[in-house]
Amino acid sequence: MNKNMTQLEAAKLQMFLQAKLNPELVVQCRNRPDECAEIHIADECLGVVSKIIDEGETSYSFEITILDIDLEDL
């Protein structure tokens, strides 16, 4: 099994996340082969989605990082 995120997987994840979370969300594979892709809205990177292969099953984990300075104006 290939642990690297493919363009096809990124496209499928984008369609899923757009339907569930936000239609403006974009999933972008990184320039280097990697097991994760970046999640963007406009020019802001919100986090990453990682590909996990365990016991022959593939799943994806979405991680978002929120900085304390991002919460100051709320």
Image (cartoon, grey):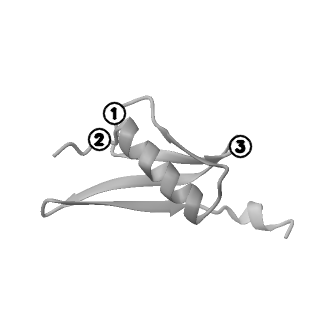
Residue type at mark 2: give it.
Answer: Asn
Residue 49 spot, x, y in % from top left: 44, 54
Please name the residue shown 77% across and 67% down the image. Answer: 71
Residue type at mark 1: give it.
Answer: Pro
* Residue matched to label 3: 42
Please name the residue shown 61% across and 64% down the image. Answer: 21
Q: Are marks 1 and 2 in contact (CB under 8 Å)?
A: yes
Q: Is residue 58 above or below residue 6?
A: below
Q: Is residue 2 above or below residue 62?
A: above
Q: Residue furthest left?
A: 55
Residue 47 spot, x, y in % from top left: 55, 54
- Left or right: 42 with respect to 35? right
Residue 62 spot, x, y in % from top left: 46, 61
Residue 16 spot, x, y in % from top left: 49, 57
* Label 1 packing within 10 angstroms: few (<14), some (14-19), many (20+): few
Task: Calculate the distance from the C-alpha at mark 1 to the C-alpha at mark 2.
Answer: 6 Å
Earlier residue among tags 3 and 2: 2
* Residue matched to label 1: 33
